[in-house]
Image (spheres, grey):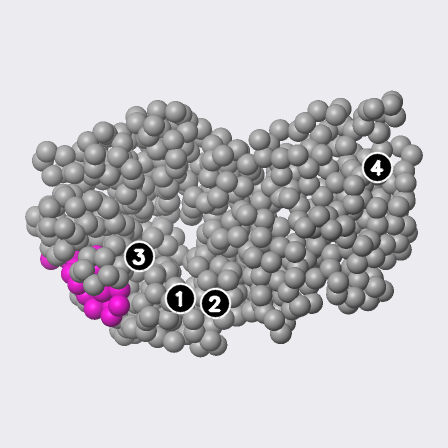
Amino acid sequence: MTRPDTPGARTHWPGVRTHSPVAPTRSLGAGAHSLGAGTHSPGARPSSPWTNAEPLRRPSGRVLRPSLLILGWAGILGAQLLAADRSLAVEPRQLWKAAGIENVVCITTTPDLDGDGRTDVVFETYDAGAPQQDHVIAIRGASDGVGEVLWSARPLGGPSNSGGYGDACLRTGEDLNGDGYPEILYGAAWGNRSAFALDGRTGMTEWSFDSYSDSPPAPPVSGWVYAVDSLGEDLDDDGVPEVLFSLGSDNDGLYCASGANGSVLWRYQAADAIFDVHSVADLDGDGIRDVAIGVGDSGGSVVTLSGDGGPFGTGFVLWLRETGSVLSLVEVPDLNGDGLNEVIAGDWNSRLLCFSGINGATLWDVGSGPDVMRVVLGDDVDGDGYPDLAVGTMGPAARVFSGRTGALVWIRTVNSFQGGDVWAIDWMGDVTGDGIADVCAGSFNENVYAMDGVDGTILWEANVNDRILTVRGAPDLDGNGWPDVVAGTQKLSTGGDCYAFDGRGALDPAGLPGDADGGGDSPGDPNGSAPGGGAEDPNGPFGPGGLAALTEPGLFPSGPNPFRDRSSWVLALPTAARVDAAFVDAAGRSVLTRSGLEYTAGVHALVWDGRDDEGAEVPAGVYQLRLDISGVTRLQAKVVRLR
């Protein structure tokens, strides 16, 4: 198999690789202290970062008793985040496992199909060499233990009816048949080479386009269907939105087909294989959504086209910009103030590029590390008001980049067993309770990860004994109020399975959020009022029982986070300690440093007012509190400063 950016390559993006890629201080027991800057001059901020401040209060205004200081759910969460920082992440609860017949190459989630009120999951599990049997499978999202099959299908096309290839070949579309449920859009490769609209409730084929036998072009030219999407427009006035699908490996065409019956409305001939396609907001001012495609192999480029196909039905190009081979691209909100959205692509020249939606001008161009496999638009994690990007590459790390500037927000390296490549990445919703979406990733090292969206801290990891090819964040599958994660594996001697994991992972070891028996706190219980989590619990983490059992230092966020004026943490020490403290920015530069702080055993509240060593307010962004405890233990906590 050849790389898409190899000159003359006419196949597809690569198979799985098996090689490695490339001041005076005070010690006040449970007193609250403020981390700031200044001098000892009357009326000025004291030079010591830890100074007397008002006691922590609940929203009711009641002062917390120092010996029973408890921050409820936020405190419990902080303990687990800290454990992750110390590489003690625990495996999450596996919700279910569903067996496929070959590589699970792509997964999509879909609104409730079986009437239980939960999100369901569809995956494609056919690669070359599998026996001919059903390979597009819908699983009840609320399954327990073993994935309960809602339907399975073997869409027929080409001479061999084989399956899909790549992480864009399966997407949830719109309701095309009027039954109130979205259809499943699917593109097949290998010997099938067809595009399908499948009934979302039953898996039956609504329509198909077989590139071996259907035109245009005339005569037909077959091609692997790498990507599918909904256009979101009804071009032929039949009341049904249209569908997009893109091909490569002989037929390098982008098709816009009738959502009702699959008849071709227009087709664009690209320079080479089209590995990704997305409907984007209107760029040419005609009131119709337009299209962005990523072209690979020797024709590497990003192309935008008018959604109506132009006057001759051959695809009207709005702009084209040459790049390396592009496997993944996304639409992002307006960055340059012209009122139009932009397009960001990752390529196989190890670049991440942002293009102006109006004319394709390069707004920024940055190095991505290794070659890019997947780009996903997500949450604003750096506090600049723009959504940011999770990026998977042909290397052993997950990355988040600023959507506004392309700056690297964070990188989280994973172990490089079997190369460790992190091709699979997605946003998974907020599981840490900080109001910012977190990231899920899958690696060739056979682990699925949940990572803090703000700084990449590994929240949990799950080993499945096979390479991970695809991963998706999923809305709550198990009904515990938290988003979850689904992942698909390669099939060698084992594997070819779809897994679902509790997105909350091990962050709540006392029980499920809101579980009255387990004592966990729910997202709606910030004061820790659930049994086992409240301030009055003598056996809680900061009650006498908890302090007596404390064997190592702990750092617990109190909030708010993100913050504007100040944020706070609780430091718990089993013995007296000397503490060195520093806040560093996302580039690793120190903005505030204090050394030689002496603390007694017990609980100490730490408060930062968002100022640096000079007393100036730090800009908006991601910061990290780093504490060195007696030169033995290092504790860390992230915080986001808002504008």
Query: Where, quadrant-wise, is the N terminus in this rendering?
Result: bottom left
Q: Is residue 513 magenta?
A: no
User: Is 217 left, or right, of 251 in this rendering?
Assistant: left
Q: Give the CA separation, mark 3 to mark 2.
A: 22 Å
Give the SS element for disc 1: loop
Q: Give the CA separation, mark 4 to mark 3.
A: 55 Å
| Rendered residue at 11%/46% (across/down) | 237
User: Label 2 near label 3: C-beta < 8 Å?
Assistant: no
Residue hosting label 2: 479
User: Is 513 left, or right, of 332 in this rendering?
Assistant: right
Give the SS element for disc 3: strand
Task: Give neighbour class at mark 4: few <14, some 14-19, many 20+ (Cα, 10 Å).
Answer: many
Under mark 1, the amino acid is Arg
Q: Give the CA separation, mark 2 to mark 1.
A: 8 Å
Numbered range of the magenta stretch: 194-213
Residue hosting label 3: 172
Is residue 628 visible from the viewing direction of this image? no
| Rendered residue at 35%/55% (across/down) | 166
User: Label 2 near label 4: C-beta < 8 Å?
Assistant: no
